[in-house]
């Protein structure tokens, strides 16, 4: 019988009774064929592979990450709590030492969910990885963590949440934002004043294939991870770079995903997007599972796999070589660049327009990060949207100094409820959350 | 009259029933190498002076196939496999000769690539060279489309016997298990067949003309005739017989634990709402996980004859049996000795049992009675821990819908049924440890034989309809036929019920016993682009394990018939 080299925990929860709408890509059928494949391959009988049912995330877990407007119960369904709970279950299995690695094959996905949430965008409401990660930090103590987002779409939500957190290095590899939703994720987006350089965006041209992806992993992502030397590697394992995906334009393969997973060697992987439900997901997920378990994946190929047909155009190799060099140069000189950008400033203001595609709502946001010599700095967000909400949200970061803690609480206390539809405070030092609605 | 036989590892248990009453109970030791003689002897003892023509049926639970596998006395099998892309398939090559075909059928039953027929001819030649007659044919996703398996069998052209096709054994997805199940079916075929014909002859010679049924591991039966082509399903039917016996002797309508405490092991099973809980995938036979539908049963190495030792100042029971209890002249103290000392059991020499406890007490600096008490407590704790662990595992079986995850049914036993030699002695301890009533059914010594006698035929089928492709597949019956786009879940349900009823009838069920039910169903909209192109409908139907035809309810088995 087969025996896993790495003990692997699998939270496989296809949520067969949940859909955004009957014909939406995020529908009941999405993981049907993947489950068929996983069952037919007898994955559950592999010694060292253990299946877990997801737990259900609690309100508290969400409040550590998000400001839900107007409140959690208005936005978040049971399915979202189960998806986030599934990621937590995977992380717990690893942290408790029950398994070496874990993969949460859960839906709905989460990486487009920002810190402030008005509803569904890019099929996401709750940032599943962030909720998991903050649970891990709260339960098992601080951790330096790398999140490598290999979904085809820029992980703009995760970027937003960890923008100013140097304990979380966020690396997103995705199809160039000039050609795909959500239209962001350029190398210039590099992090806030407290964590400049700890957000890394690697936009790939359409039709990038196995060769290109693996080049970027080996020549850019792995060197950066080595420099950072994290305690934990998390992979947001979106599967929509596949050549058969209906809503993207890449040439990646099941073999490529398996090889990439083996090289990244993540502790925890969480499924994100991927909507080629018959031609890609059954094979890509199987490839990732085998790679994580340390088993032979060389026979995992799509039935119509033809490396010649999906070879990336020749110019891409040269383009990626330059791109990787440029990004790595920025990474090594991030401290000098930060000095130049933020020296003498007492706060940095970002204005953002965030579009909620699923519910057709536009949010206008102004985020102010204090430049603090003692900590990463208090974050204050003013946000309003077409739904008529206008909020003030204050985040006291985990590493906040006494002054920033005081200042955060004062800002919350003294804000005039007459000026806003809601005032929110997230104190990550004391693990507190309060709202005046 | 009905005869129920349970041929176990060392003994044959048998009962003769009439109208729900136990007329005779016989238990004899036997030698597995002369199993047929043993069975004849038992029947003679059961039926002496009775009119054999009035026997309505004989139900038999046998270890013939189990022993063949565990002792390696099986026929060489040639396997023809088709794995397509996926997990490296080399580990499923369990036959004496193994050939891999180059075709592939995908998860929707679509033929991605045909196989080269020359490969089958090559396999056929090689098997003949090696003197192999038994063949197994298994292709990946054959339960979604059995056409490759069927075609391979056609190509083998009657030159081999048996040719077991994977799809006919189970509708469940799991290629490696399907391979092992098909392999075992072909491997035990010859032994089972010769046993079956010998037993039929022997019965004829005795003048028994009644139908003979064989017990399956799922607590159901099938006719001996059908069992010949599906012998793998007769493997490990012993624990199932005991569980069914408990259900008859002391019916429960709630969740319950069933324990069979033997000499070396205690088998633990569960009832969910009064019905035996089944293994999720199938039973494990020796080194092989299979798709053989079976009553869930977990063995712990703890029984009346387990050796009791003292290690680091503490009592340790098992896991080994070093011989019979000290009371019967065995080498080590055992829980049975403790029960004898406590006055809960009465056999052998009480004096020797007492000495055995005294010996332990000397090391522990305790009185023999106290030692006996500690052993019983410890046994209770070990069983409780096992039950708790199993419940945790069973209650976290994977679910796939939010509804099941949040509101799904959990197994919460309200009572215990305990059988086996030390049952009466242990019951009060178990009751105290598990904090639920623990019942010892009347006639519990014959539970396995009674279970075998009164179990009815079971059947299961899986129906998959893919209206986008326009096909319906029922692997267990080898059905793959066209349907139109208007096929609905409702039609799938009624079709599945009808098919499972027909299946049960073929396996030997009497019409009044066939209660078909749907156990799983789902219906997915298949969307390609932004359009719904069809439905993917999946229905499982079964005739569940239950009791049959003895002219009354199980409760009546006591009073008059009791020995």
Image (cartoon, rainbow, N blue to C red):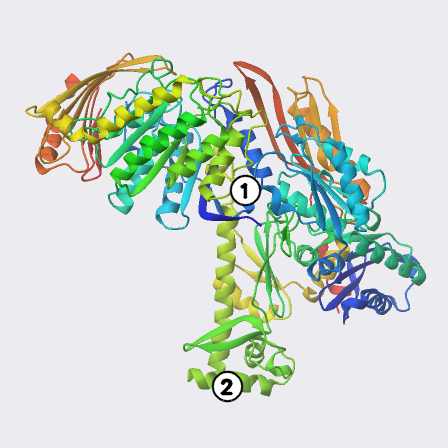
Q: Position of residue B405 (x, y in %)?
A: 47, 38
In the displayed structure image, the side of residue A270 where residue B418 appears, left or right: right
Instruction: Tell which tag, 2 or 1, sits nearer the viewer.
Output: 1
In the picture, which quadrant includes the C terminus of chain A? top left
Q: Position of residue A73 (x, y in %)?
A: 34, 28
Give the structural element (helix, strand or loop) at label 1. helix
Q: Is residue A135 above or below residue B205?
A: above
Which residue corresponds to the image point at 28% horizontal and 11% vertical from the top-left? A386
Depth check, front residue: B287 or A93: B287
Q: Residues within 10 Å of mark 1 (few under 14, many from 20)?
A: many
Q: Is residue B408 among the parts visible in the rendering?
A: yes
Q: Position of residue B506 (x, y in %)?
A: 81, 41
Q: Position of residue A285 (x, y in %)?
A: 49, 33
Mark count: 2
Q: Is residue B546 among the parts visible in the rendering?
A: no
In the rendered structure, the residue with mark 1 lies on which chain?
A: A
Which residue corresponds to the image point at 25% horizontal and 38% vertical from the top-left? A228
Depth check, front residue: B225 or B135: B135
Residue identifier under label 2: B358
In the displayed structure image, the side of residue B149 where residue B90 appears, left or right: left
In the rendered structure, the residue with mark 2 lies on which chain?
A: B
In the displayed structure image, the side of residue A232 where residue B226 appears, left or right: right
Q: Is residue A16 above or below residue B20?
A: above
Which residue corresponds to the image point at 51% horizontal and 39% vertical from the top-left? B408
Give the structural element (helix, strand or loop) at label 2. helix
Q: Is residue B30 above or below residue A265?
A: below
Which residue corresponds to the image point at 18% horizontal and 19% vertical from the top-left? A350
**Which disc, if any, is residue A53?**
none
Residue identifier under label 1: A43
Q: Circles 2 and 1: CB distance less than 8 Å?
A: no
Depth check, front residue: A359 or B519: A359
């Amino acid at each position: 019988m087969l025996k896993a080299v790495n003990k692997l925990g699998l939270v496989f929860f296809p949520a067969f009774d949940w859909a955004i709408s009957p014909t939406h890509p995020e529908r009941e059928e999405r993981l049907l064929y993947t489950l068929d494949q996983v069952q037919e391959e007898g994955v559950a009988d592999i010694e060292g592979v253990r299946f877990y049912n997801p737990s259900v995330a609690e309100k508290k877990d969400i409040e550590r990450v998000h400001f839900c407007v107007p409140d959690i119960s208005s936005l978040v369904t049971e399915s979202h709590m189960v998806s986030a709970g599934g990621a937590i279950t995977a992380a717990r299995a690893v942290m408790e030492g029950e398994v070496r690695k874990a993969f949460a094959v859960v839906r709905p996905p989460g990486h487009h969910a920002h810190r402030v949430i008005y509803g569904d965008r890019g099929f996401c409401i709750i940032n599943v990885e962030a909720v998991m990660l903050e649970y891990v930090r709260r339960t098992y103590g601080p951790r330096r963590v790398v999140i490598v987002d290999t979904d085809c779409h820029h992980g703009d939500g995760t970027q937003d949440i960890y923008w100013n957190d140097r304990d979380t290095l966020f690396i997103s590899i995705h199809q160039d934002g000039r050609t795909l939703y959500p239209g962001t994720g350029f190398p210039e987006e590099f992090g806030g004043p407290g964590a400049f350089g700890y957000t890394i965006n690697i936009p790939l041209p359409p039709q990038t294939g196995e060769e290109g992806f693996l080049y970027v992993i080996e020549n850019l992502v792995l060197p950066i991870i080595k420099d950072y030397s994290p305690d934990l590697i998390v992979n947001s394992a979106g599967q929509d770079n596949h050549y058969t995906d209906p809503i993207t334009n890449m040439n990646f393969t099941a073999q490529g995903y398996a090889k990439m997973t083996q090289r990244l060697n993540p502790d925890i992987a969480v499924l994100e997007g991927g909507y080629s439900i018959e031609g890609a997901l059954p094979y890509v997920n199987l490839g990732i599972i085998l790679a994580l378990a340390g088993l032979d994946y060389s026979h995992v190929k799509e039935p119509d796999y033809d490396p010649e047909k999906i070879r990336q155009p020749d110019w891409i190799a040269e383009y990626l070589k330059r791109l990787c060099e440029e990004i790595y140069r920025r990474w090594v000189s991030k401290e000098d660049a930060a000095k130049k950008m933020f020296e003498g400033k007492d706060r940095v203001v970002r204005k953002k327009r965030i579009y909620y595609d699923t519910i057709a709502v536009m949010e206008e946001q102004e985020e102010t990060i204090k430049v603090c010599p003692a900590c990463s700095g208090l974050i204050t967000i003013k946000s309003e949207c077409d739904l008529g909400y206008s909020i003030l949200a204050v985040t006291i970061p985990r590493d906040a100094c006494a002054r920033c803690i005081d200042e955060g609480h004062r800002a919350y206390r003294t804000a005039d409820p007459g000026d806003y539809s809601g005032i929110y405070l997230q104190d990550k030092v004391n693990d507190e959350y309060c709202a005046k609605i | 009259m009905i005869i129920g036989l349970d041929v176990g590892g060392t003994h044959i248990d048998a009962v003769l029933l009439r109208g729900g009453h136990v007329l005779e109970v016989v238990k004899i030791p036997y030698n597995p190498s002369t199993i047929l003689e043993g069975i004849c002897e038992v029947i003679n003892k059961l039926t002496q002076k009775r009119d054999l023509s009035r026997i309505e049926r004989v139900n038999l639970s046998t270890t013939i196939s189990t022993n063949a596998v565990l002792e390696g006395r099986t026929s060489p099998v040639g396997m023809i496999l088709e794995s397509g892309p996926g997990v490296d398939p080399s580990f499923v090559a369990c036959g004496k000769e193994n050939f891999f075909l180059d075709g592939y059928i995908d998860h929707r039953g679509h033929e991605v690539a045909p196989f080269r027929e020359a490969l089958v001819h090559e396999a056929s030649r090689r098997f003949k060279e090696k003197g192999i007659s038994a063949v197994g044919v298994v292709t990946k996703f054959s339960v979604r489309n059995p056409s490759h398996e069927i075609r391979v069998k056609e190509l083998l052209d009657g030159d081999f016997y048996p040719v077991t096709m994977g799809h006919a054994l189970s509708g469940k997805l799991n290629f490696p298990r399907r391979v092992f199940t098909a392999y075992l079916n072909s491997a035990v075929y010859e032994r089972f067949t010769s046993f079956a014909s010998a037993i039929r002859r022997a019965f004829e010679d005795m003048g028994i003309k009644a139908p003979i049924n064989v017990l399956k591991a799922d607590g159901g039966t099938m006719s001996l005739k059908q069992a010949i082509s599906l012998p793998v399903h007769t493997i490990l039917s012993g624990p199932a017989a005991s569980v069914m016996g408990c259900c008859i002797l002391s019916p429960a309508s709630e969740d319950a634990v069933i324990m069979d405490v033997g000499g070396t092991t205690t088998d633990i099973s569960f009832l969910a709402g009064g019905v035996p809980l089944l293994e999720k995938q199938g039973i494990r036979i020796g080194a092989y996980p299979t798709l053989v539908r079976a009553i869930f049963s977990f063995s712990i190495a703890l029984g009346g004859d387990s050796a009791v030792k003292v290690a680091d100042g503490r009592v340790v029971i098992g896991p080994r049996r070093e011989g019979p209890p000290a009371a019967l002249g065995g080498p080590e103290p055992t829980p049975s000795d403790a029960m004898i000392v406590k006055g809960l059991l009465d056999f052998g020499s009480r004096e020797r049992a007492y000495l055995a406890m005294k010996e332990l007490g000397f090391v522990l600096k305790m009185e023999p009675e106290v030692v006996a008490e500690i052993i019983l407590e410890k046994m209770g704790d070990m069983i409780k821990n096992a039950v708790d662990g199993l419940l945790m595992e069973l209650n976290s079986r994977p679910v796939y819908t939010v509804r099941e995850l949040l509101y799904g049914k959990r197994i919460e036993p309200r009572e215990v049924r305990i059988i086996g030699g030390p049952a009466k002695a242990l019951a009060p301890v178990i009751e105290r440890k598990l904090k639920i009533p623990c019942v010892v059914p009347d006639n519990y010594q014959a539970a396995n034989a009674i279970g075998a006698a009164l179990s009815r035929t079971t059947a299961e089928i899986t129906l998959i309809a893919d209206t986008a492709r326009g096909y319906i597949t029922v692997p267990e019956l080898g059905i793959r036929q066209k349907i139109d786009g208007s096929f609905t879940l409702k039609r799938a349900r009624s079709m599945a019920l009808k098919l499972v009823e027909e299946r049960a009838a073929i396996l030997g069920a009497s019409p009044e016993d066939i209660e078909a039910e749907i156990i799983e169903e789902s219906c997915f909209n298949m969307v390609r682009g932004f359009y719904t192109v069809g439905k993917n409908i999946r229905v499982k139907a079964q005739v569940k394990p239950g009791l049959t035809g003895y002219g009354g309810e199980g409760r009546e088995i006591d009073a008059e018939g009791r020995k």
